[in-house]
Image: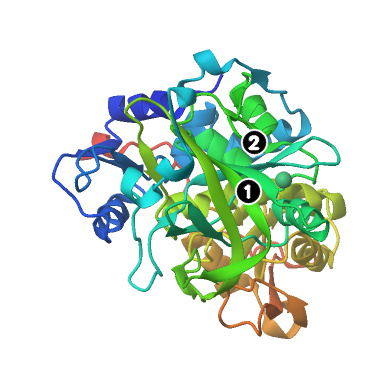
Amino acid sequence: MAKCTTMRDWLDYLQEKEELATINKRVSLDFEIAAVTKLLDGKKGAFFNQVEDYGIPVVAGVASTRKQFAEALDVSERELIARFQQAIDSPLPCEEVSSSVATVHQNIIEGDDIDLLKQFPIPVHHEKDSGRYITAGLAIAKDPLTGKQNVSIHRLQVSGKNRLGALILPRHLYNFYKNAEDTGKPLEIAIVIGVDPIMLLASQAIAPLGQDEMEISGALKGQAEKVVKCKTVDIMVPADAEIVLEGKILPHVREPEGPFGEFPKYYGPKSDKEVIEITCVTHRDQPIFQTIVPATYEHLLLGAIPREASLLRSIRNTVPTVSGVHLTLGGTCRYHLVVSMKKRNDGEPKNVMFAAFAGHYDVKHVVVVDDEVDIFNMEEVEWAIATRFQAEKDLLVVHGALGSKLDPSTDNGVSSKLGFDCTVPLNSEPLEFERIQIPGLQEIKLEDYL
Ligand code: MN
């Protein structure tokens, strides 16, 4: 059973483990929240009690290590990927509750009374960002054809009292929106702020169109997510979220959005993007505002874990003896993939590379190693590249494929792909590639000698 059901449960858990820093010093929305969160990144979450004059605390970095995500799910770090894939395979339908018991409906703000910048402490994260951004908002929309909901996260620039500019990449939400826009209609949407790390993780699942990520979240927790119907749109949202913004993506309207500091540690440029108009805001009594500071470990790992789950499955469809995959932090948890395998046939590592590139367009450089190399230890991985790789025969290069548009070295996303086969040749001499060992090293306890 998972260790958290709502964000508040999870914050209590972090506090008990001394992994949540409470900051009582008054902080500014301009960069200060981002700076303090960044300094705590990978160690502790940050809970800011006094943010300017808002009277609403801000939380950031609720999970910034693989260990914390694993603890939230009550599995070991090594079981994390398998557990995630299992939840995608066996989603758990949500349970509807009435508005009267939904804490997120304790307060309702409608129409002209909405003023996002005045009502909520929405930070500015990076130097050249165009302004205040909602970065931890789950965007929930419903497919008008099937009635199935979709959950995703988009960067949301606050452009006015009740107006957001959104980056909507060509995935599921974009598909719903384009279908609506083609008939001249707006698409109803709800933005959910203040949720636990499991729900955030589930929202990033590489699941097929038509699968509701909220049901994956329920499966990960082993407990159905409680949802409530929105006040002004026909969408179900988590009943115990902190804040929900209800609204619509306007058809045939585009307004400037950006620049904005993104996960690859560069700015996404300013351009005309889709616009969301907010029609109603609901929130808990004394809500907590959640933010994700871009390019922190929290942001990177939210991308890595679900991608690793889907890549492991798709690569195994090609080469079943693949044992693990790792999207590395230095590779922005998107571009660099390390794969371990038991090689049974020469040539298989190259098939692994093809499968990896086909598995997700973000994958740019792939390193394939033997099963005994620890793919989560980058010193080991570099050692394998240093001693088991010859460019003449072990290098695979493909030019002109689709990569990430956020990688500034690509030509608007058109990218070269590179693979390193660092596996030992099957016909090598017995001692040639045998790793040196000190007998007894694992059993010796240093305390006995000091
Ligand atoms: Mn989806």
Q: Badge 2 local density, few (<14 within 10 Å), some, or many (20+)?
A: some
Residue type, numbered disc 1: Lys
**Residue position marked by numbered label 1 in the rendering:** 248
Q: Position of residue 285 (x, y in %)?
A: 35, 25
**Residue depicted at x 38% and y 65%:** 131
Q: Quadrant of the N terminus?
A: top right
How far apart are the two marked residues, 1 and 2, measured between alpha carbons? Answer: 8 Å
Horizontal side, residue 41 vs residue 241: left or right: left
Horizontal and vertical percent position of residue 263 = 49, 63
Element class at badge 1: strand
Circle 2 — which element?
loop
Whether 144 is drawn above or below 260: the answer is: above
Q: Residue at x 35, y 51 (%)?
A: 117
Looking at the image, the residue that sits furthest to the left is 25
| Residue under pointer 2 | 233
Closest to the observer, 159 or 26: 159
Figure quadrant of residue 219: top right
One can see residue 21 in this view: yes
| Identity of the residue drawn at 36% across and 29% down | 11
Visible residue check, residue 436: no
